């Protein structure tokens, strides 16, 4: 059995890791940390885990965590970078679900996240954990930066178009919507049911922290700079991301075949039949990205629709997918559930 630790087990991504790992046949969760809840049984906070984890939250301890084969950080931005160097020295591998190692440009990261990076020397080593893009590098990585939820949906949606050089690299648009769980479990007036229910709004239009991450991904695909407008929106639902992506064609192509071929061997990307409109409920609770590609009125504009569960393919599920690859396990282990409907 693989011994796994979770730092920050009380947030939504932490409990989603626990829910998915409870069904993983080759993983034993040996430590779950929370300074605020140390000593309290996990099932006291998350009753859905009763009978699955007979373990209590504990204070973070480097010796205990370092004895694990792999540690997940499901913590706020800026936490993992303080502990990761010591864990790597002890031979432990790490998947960080926050943003500490996602951006290669450290001054840009410090600008967007408002803090000084405490271990910039590890940023270049960290592998960006989008398996559909970096699977081989992930296999040998000590440190994986798990992608953000919006960047996962937007990058997968744009990937075949940019990789094949079929669209203009200027004027790209990512119009994305997320459920309120993307804001985390912390109490906030803006995410109260009375505030978000029966309402819909954009936010972060002048700039969102995921924008430089999406731009970095697309620029690496294109091997040159790109121009992107990214607008996130808040939906009155708990889970799910819907990304509507726009690009302008520069050449003729069979777009349906392009997408089906590119993702034909990807276990967690489902290209829907031509004319489809994916729904967020079709990925609720699972590690899938469902994609449909359209060319309205046979014009020059391509419209790509991509849906994921922000807590699974957008966070915990993708982190487990990365763990499986890093540890030489079957990539789909623990991630084979069927989405919840209705």
Image (tube, helix red, strand yellow):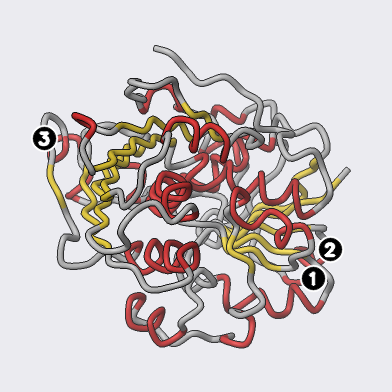
Q: Nearer the viewer, mark 2 or mark 3?
A: 3
Residue receiving disc 1: 63
Q: Determine which residue is flagged by label 2.
A: 67
Residue shown at 18% from the left, 50% from the top: 189
Dot 2 lies on which element? loop
Quadrant location of the N terminus in the rendered image: top right
Looking at the image, the residue that sits furthest to the right is 1
Question: In front: 35, or 101?
Answer: 101
Q: Residue at x 52, y 29 (%)?
A: 270
Q: CA distance from mark 2 to mark 3?
A: 47 Å
Q: Nearer the viewer, residue 55 or 233?
A: 233
User: Badge 1: how crowded within 10 Å, few (<14), some, or many (20+)?
Assistant: few
Q: Which mark is residue 313?
A: none
Residue 151: horizontal and vertical position, in percent?
41, 54
Residue 20 position in % (x across, y down): 63, 35
Tell me: residue 123, above or below residue 132: below
Q: Which residue is mark 3?
A: 199
Q: Is residue 142 above or below residue 264?
A: below
Does residue 221 sit above or below 200 in this rendering? below
Residue at 72% x, 53% y is 31
Name which of mark 2 and mark 3 comes first in the sequence: 2
Quadrant location of residue 290?
top left
């Amino acid at each position: 059995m693989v011994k796994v630790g979770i730092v920050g087990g009380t947030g939504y991504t932490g409990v989603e890791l626990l829910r998915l790992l409870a069904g993983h046949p080759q993983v034993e969760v040996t430590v779950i940390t929370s300074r605020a809840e140390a000593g309290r049984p996990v099932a006291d906070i998350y009753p859905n885990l009763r009978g699955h984890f007979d373990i209590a939250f504990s204070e973070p301890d480097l010796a205990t965590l370092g004895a694990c084969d792999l540690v997940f950080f499901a913590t706020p931005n800026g936490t993992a970078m303080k502990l990761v160097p010591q864990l790597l020295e002890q031979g432990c591998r790490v998947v960080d679900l926050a943003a500490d190692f996602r951006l290669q440009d450290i001054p840009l990261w410090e600008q967007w996240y408002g803090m000084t990076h405490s271990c910039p020397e590890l940023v270049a080593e960290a592998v960006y954990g989008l398996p559909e893009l970096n699977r081989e590098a992930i296999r040998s990585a000590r440190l994986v930066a798990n992608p953000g939820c919006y960047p996962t949906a937007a990058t997968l949606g744009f990937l075949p178009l940019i990789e094949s050089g079929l669209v203009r690299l200027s004027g790209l648009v990512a119009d994305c919507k997320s459920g309120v769980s993307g804001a985390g479990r912390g109490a906030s007036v803006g995410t109260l049911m009375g505030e978000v229910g029966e309402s819909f709004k954009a936010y972060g239009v002048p700039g969102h922290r995921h924008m430089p991450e999406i731009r970095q991904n697309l620029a690496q695909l294109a091997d040159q700079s790109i121009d992107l407008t990214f607008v996130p929106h808040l939906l009155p639902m708990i889970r799910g991301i819907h990304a509507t992506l726009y690009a302008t064609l520069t050449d003729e192509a069979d777009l349906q075949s392009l997408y089906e071929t590119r993702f034909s061997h990807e276990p967690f990307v489902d290209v829907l039949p031509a004319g489809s409109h994916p729904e967020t409920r079709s990925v609720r609770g699972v590690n899938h990205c469902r994609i449909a590609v359209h060319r309205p009125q046979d014009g020059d504009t391509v419209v790509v629709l991509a849906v994921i569960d922000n807590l699974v393919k957008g966070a915990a599920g993708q982190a487990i997918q990365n763990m499986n690859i890093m540890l030489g396990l079957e990539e789909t282990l623990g991630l084979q559930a069927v989405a919840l409907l209705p």
